[in-house]
Image: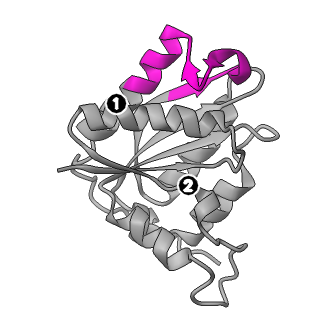
Amino acid sequence: MVTVAAVPGSLRTESYTRLALDRALDAAEATGADTELLDLRAFDLPPLDPDVDGQGDAAAFTRRVREADAVLLGSPMYHGSYSGVLKNALDHCGFDEFEGKTVGLLGVAGGAFPITTLEHLRSVCRALDAWVLPHQAAIPRASAAFEDGRLVDDTLAARVDTLGRRIVEYATIEPDPSTFESNQNVGG
């Protein structure tokens, strides 16, 4: 059975990002996957200090990401990019967690489309040699897109559902052979 983990890059109690990822996970479950939401509020992930081993809950978090067959990453758009808490969580991860792994992306914005959020996440995942789904979900004007915790726009809901189905469909895609460049991104 395919396992899918979702990481919402929002700490808000009433997070639209978390609600949207929950919906994507529901679609993944309906396709037969085993799913898990890795809520960053539940992990102690201090700012990454590469000189310190065993920071907070980093080992538990990275283990759960590593064990998943595929990962959904979602973030609200902050200053034209993705959230700092998601950046920090991804900094605790590396090639062991993402190389060859299928990743799906979801971006949420209070205003216009969170395209740069999705582009920045795509760049990070590609640097980690993940296989990023071509399909992505963007939810603009989030406060109007949700009502009572549910997506009310059928088109947006269909995009999120498709993301959940696609992450399962492509979870076991054969990764491309390693390239010279893939061995060059080893961190500072």
Q: Is residue 22 above or below residue 92?
A: above
At 31% across and 36% down in the image, what residue appears?
28
Work out which residue is located at the far right of the displayed protein and give it: 79
Work out which residue is located at the far top of the displayed protein and give it: 154
Q: Is residue 184 above or below residue 31?
A: below
Q: Is residue 127 magenta?
A: no
For disc 2, the marked residue is 39
Q: Quadrant of residue 138?
A: top right
> Disc 1 marks which amino acid?
Ala
For marks 2 and 1 on the same chain, the one whose residue lies earlier in the sequence: 1
> Disc 2 marks which amino acid?
Asp
Label 2 residue SS: loop
Work out which residue is located at the far front of the displayed protein and give it: 148
Q: Nearer the viewer, residue 41 or 163?
A: 41
At 40% across and 66% down in the image, what residue appears?
64
Q: Nearer the viewer, residue 2 or 123?
A: 2
Magenta segment boundaries in residue numbering: 137-161
Q: Quadrant of residue 188?
A: bottom right
Q: Position of residue 51 (x, y in %)?
A: 67, 90
For disc 1, the marked residue is 27
